Amino acid sequence: MMWAASAAELPTPVAIDVSGVLSESMTLTAEARKYENAEGVARDYARAVELYCAAAKLGYADAQYALGWMYANGRGVPRSDEIAAQLFQAAAEQGHSQAKELTQFVPSQTLALPACLLEERIVIEQPQEDAAPGNYPKAIAKLVDKIAPHYRIDPKLVMAVISVESGFNIKAISPKNAQGLMQLTPETAQRFRVKDAFDAEDNIKGGIAYLQWLLAYFKGNVPLVAAAYNAGERAVEKYRGVPPYLETIEYVKKINSRYGKSRHAFQRSITEASPVVMR
């Protein structure tokens, strides 16, 4: 199947304040387009694919779409509708309109991604100065210190999640209706028996219970736990690691920088006793 749309036809994306990851992704994608379309440089499809792949690995939807187009048309790589479909789907899952249109015609049945997207994508960073426990609200820290030990969870991990999820806003509500300090969706709140997501203690208990379950499911791998907390267990399973979503990659990097550890103790019995509810 040949695709009529070209990556060069994409509009210039609007920058959002997520960090240098977006800026780097946009720079790589712009450079790739130059090589793809011979704009001031000799046309080099292989180099374009390399650059698109680097940006796609950072979770940039425009690059995922562009790389999918290269695979769909066999430019710089062997043609593969399967890989193209998965790349279009990854971009569509982030709201990319052109990719959404194309996924209607190429429903993907199996995971088929370029090798570069299946490589390790997260670099563990050292804790930042702003992550010092003394900078966290004392009332919330006191609640976490009381609850976390009952679930055998490091309070520092919980505080890192709360700081990234809600900035310690008890009444926070996300566009996806995630609620409270640990941003529990109604489904997750029900799953972990949270009666009032806007009650600080109830919310924290539910969020910690979810972290406990994720730690058991992903065998103490903190980056995967963070990715699943943000994007859902199903997405982590699907992509065999941190999903290639800009938001999720940025989220995991923030958790890593504030917690500073890639491993956490876990209890194998938790997932054996609890139902597996993928989202």
Image (cartoon, rainbow, N blue to C red):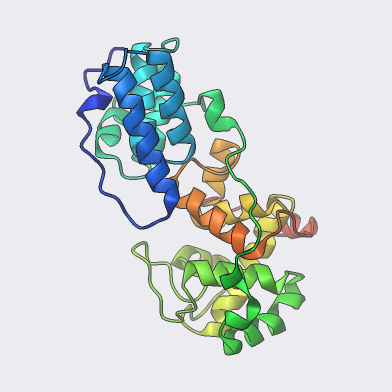
Q: Residue at x 20, y 28 (%)?
A: 9
Q: Position of residue 261 (x, y in %)?
A: 71, 58
Quadrant position of residue 146: bottom right
Relative height, residue 231 to residue 111 (above, below): below
Name the quadrant of the N terminus.
top left
Q: Position of residue 279 (x, y in %)?
A: 50, 51
Q: Residue at x 41, y 11 (%)?
A: 79
Relative height, residue 83 to residue 230 (above, below): above
Quadrant position of residue 10: top left
Q: Is residue 207 visible?
A: no
Residue sitting at the far front: 40
Count of picture labels:
0
Q: Is residue 146 left or right of residue 105?
A: right
Relative height, residue 201 to residue 43 (above, below): below
Q: Is residue 266 left or right of residue 39?
A: right
Q: Residue at x 45, y 10 (%)?
A: 78
- State the residue in front, 31 or 205: 31
Q: Position of residue 26 (x, y in %)?
A: 35, 39
